[in-house]
Amino acid sequence: MEAFVVLLAIPLLGAPALWLLGDREIAPEVNAAFSLATFAASAWLTAEVISGGPITAWNEQFFVDALNVFLVALTAFVGFTTSLFSRPYMRIEREKGKMTGPRLRLYHSMYQAFMFTMLAALTTNNLGILWVAMEAATLATVLLVSVYRTAASLEAAWKYFILCGVGIAQALFGTILLYFAAERVLGAEGNALLWTHLNLVKGDLEPAIMSLAFVFLLVGYGTKVGLVPLHNWLPDAHAEGPTPISAVLSGLLLNVALYSVLRCKVLADGALDSRFASNMMMGFGLLSVVVAAFFLSRQRDVKRMFAYSSIEHMGLITFAFGMGGPIANFAGLLHMTVHSLVKSAIFFAVGHAAQKAGTQVMEDIRGLMKVSPTVGWGLMIGTLAILGMPPFGVFASEFLILTTAMREHPWATPFLLLALGVAFAAVFSRVQPMVFGDTHMQPLAHQPALVPVFVHLGLGLLLGLYIPPYLAAWYAEAARLLG
Amino acid sequence: MNLEGLLAQLLAMAVALAGGPLLAGWVNQCRAWLQGRRAPPLLMPFRMLHKLFWKESVVAHDASPIFRITPYIVFGCMLLASLIIPTLSTDLPMAPAADAIALVGLFGIARLFISLAAMDIGTAFGTMGARREMLVGFLAEPAFLMVLFTASLISSSTSLATTVSTLAHREFAILPSLAFAGIAFTMVSLAENARVPVDNPATHLELTMIHEALVLEYSGRHLALIEWAATLKLFAYSCAGLAIFFPWGIAEARDHAALLWALPVLAVKLAIGGFTLALIETILAKMRIFRVPEFLATAFLLGVLALLVHLLLGA
Amino acid sequence: MTSLTSQVINLFASVLLLIAFAMLSQRRIVTLINLFALQGLALVGSTVTVAWATGQHHLYWSAGITFVLKVVALPLILHRLIRRLNVKWDIETLINIPTMMLVGIVLVVFAFNLALPISEFSNSIARGTLGIALACVLMAFLMMITRSKAVPQVIGFLAMENGLFFAATSATYGMPMVVELGIALDVLVGMIILGVFMFQIREQFDSLDIHHLEKLKED
């Protein structure tokens, strides 16, 4: 209970505090301190869950179980490391004149607001509040995407706002339908939207309503996950926003959106007694994997390319959850974790690389290894990790997903293998000359923060080699919950 | 066909023949009042008809028989139309012969012939008028049909007499579909009767007129018949609108007292309707001809909406 | 559950539908805002009717919030916005209104068919209204797709929210109060952010035409 209050209160207080603090020299440190405190609170909450099992709070409006507790910890952790990365990154941006005092103030304040909305979305038990938090997350980030006020960033932010706004409106309609179905079983009181209550009676929910509701929910939250064909906002927003924001969008927001879909899928599966929801997720997932893989090879902007890579991985995870069953679900959860760690590490490395080169166009970034071996190695290892090279965690989860697909849905395997192959060729052939080769780039004015990169990659490696037993137990428990 | 029915039918015919020009005179009078002019006498249209019937009818040299028979066909169509619309009583012997769709067909035949006749002479104005008339017609007809369908669906019959008696007998309910249909009907009537936002009956301005361009070549008794037919058309539309949307006061079958009572009720309703028409014509300005399709598309949309609202909401 | 209440709700539903069509074909920004306010008013009317008929008191509150937000505050903000942005008398060149109307009609039929199996379960006073609400949402969506100026797009977005709100009140007698407050807050904040945003766009492009925002494309 107290852990909840602390967890949500810290970023909620952090947003106005950083706004009031304004454009001080220590603002980035304060931002990092708030993020660290949030991370500590999430660790506290996790410890409580480990010792005492699922917790609910505030009239059951908030709860944690095996499915969201590790996502809470992951979100708080990546939020913290990103805030560390953004300290030198934003200082450099400011010296380059891309950021100004007021914009930094907005950036720091909205960063905390964004963390709050994501944590609220993850921990709420009320599917209505989940929707509110997801919409608020869009609102918090839209001004961050356009923070450079360039033509391209404004366009990206407008697209982001409109597309996600439309998408999230579909999700609201789905939520209304869900409530409509739930109200017939649970009555019109406030708890007809509480997931824990719905989960108990999911077998009694009207199938006709639930199937339509799930379609709207999947399309709505799927827009935020970046599922093809609703993905158009994603590459633009990632490419044009500041890099720390790209890292948290890719590493965290997509996860949170997918988590929302999962919660709804559990209810739909229970009510429908068919593979309708699963098949829809498999279809969207497979389409995303294939389309994104082929778009990867056409990119020239490095952040855009990795944004497409995020779409591909989100598609893969969606496909895994669509297949269902203990192994595929386990693999999906693992993939969510490692993807978020590795992808944010890549964005950190890419951010510094782009700052050194003064451009995000891949052809103009050359020879990172010479100027800054740490950035170069970070990018190289990260790329290998995200492409599914053993012994990284991505390999483990992709291997599990592929073997399950071969066993249960053999028709899908060629598509997956083809997509992964195309993605490998496209990304590796672009990153290799960026890292090696000659250069005339200059070192940066501030020492880049590369500790987060290697911490993330180290964790990704660890998860590939050895999954701690309590984490494995959570994954298994969450996989069982997902059915 | 019984005698009573025959009598009622004859009465309806007499009312239509007399009421048409009277209504036209009343509208003109109201319009004059509203515009602050001195009003022409109420019986002015009758004097016009009288004058025209006594005049010689001039026909162009190369006019085909179509030109000659058109006035009679148009007049016949309009008279028939006003006979199958329940004006005073729903007990009409003619009614089973033609339903709401046939009514639209009658108007269509009249439009076809008058347009053919206008092109027959080969003058520029006639052709232009015919073209415009067709433009208005092909947009107004579907809208009118939608309105009639809505009313028919509500009463589950396409027979106008049944529709009206059903509508008159249902208990009071708020029917948005009928409201939409009513607005659509008003718009269609304005267009079909060459009234102000679409056409101006009071001018002979070359570039804007539709109806006057069609009948420019007619004179004498031909013109009289066509003008009479035009007033009959206005009367028929008004009565159809009143019967569908304000059906109260129309007599039932074999109810003599009600039949007598129905006449003054109709007169009052028509008086109010005519005044409203004059009011609309005074308030609105004539629109450009290229805006007419949009105006009629709106009417069509409202008609479809009425139909949809009825089908979807049952209201 | 008198049938009169049902009729009144149906009346409001049809008015909403009518306004949705009107918005689809409206060229003037000012009129568009007024139509939006009118739609909000119809929404308030239907909510109050449902509240009165079902005795759900929290619906009065949400009707009040809707009134303050959608009939007063948002149109006011929008009017101020277009005055400040100096686009008050902007007229948008809409091509092919009749086609759009036809698409709109198809959408209505589609929405109704989609909602038909669900409406059967509705023991509420208004059966077909879910279909109408969905149709309003889809038409607002269509409006957003076809408009090229920023302000009408935003109005389309808000109109979509209106349709959703109508679905919530008519089909389920309103969502729980916390959720409704949250939604209202999101809409308000979103509107303010969009306002800020439009100034940024104008500063950058000297115009609010979204066609300028078509540079980011896949090569």
Image: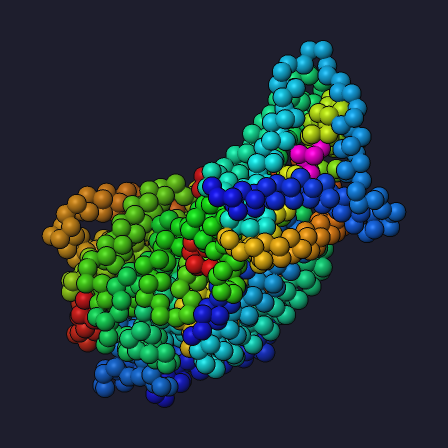
Total residue callouts: 0
Q: Position of residue A456 (x, y in %)?
A: 32, 65
Q: Position of residue A434 (x, y in %)?
A: 39, 46
Q: Is residue A217 above or below residue A127?
A: above
Position of residue A143 in the picture relative to residue B312 (left or right) = right
* Residue B229 highlighted magenta (yes or no): yes
Please identify the quadrant where the C terminus of chain C is shown: top left
Q: Residue at x 53, y 47 (%)?
A: B4
Q: Nearer the viewer, residue A101 or B119?
A: B119
Q: Residue at x 72, y 45 (%)?
A: B23
Q: Is residue A196 above or below residue B118?
A: below
Q: Position of residue C65 (x, y in %)?
A: 55, 75
Q: Tell me which secondary structure the magenta stretch mostly adopts.
A: helix
* Residue A335 highlighted magenta (yes or no): no
| The furthest residue to the top | B61
Chosen colour scheme: rainbow
Please identify the quadrant where the N terminus of chain C is shown: bottom left
Q: Position of residue B106 (x, y in %)?
A: 55, 34
| The furthest residue to the front | B3
Q: Residue at x 34, y 47 (%)?
A: A292
Residue B120 image-quadrant placement: top right
Q: Is residue A160 visible?
A: no
| The furthest residue to the left | A407
Position of residue A403 in the picture relative to residue A208 (left or right) = left
Residue A464 image-quadrant placement: bottom left
Q: Residue at x 56, y 76 (%)?
A: C64
Q: Is residue A185 above or below residue C196?
A: below
Q: Which residues are magenta?
A: B227-231
Q: Is residue B249 visible?
A: yes
Q: Nearer the viewer, residue B19 or C170?
A: B19
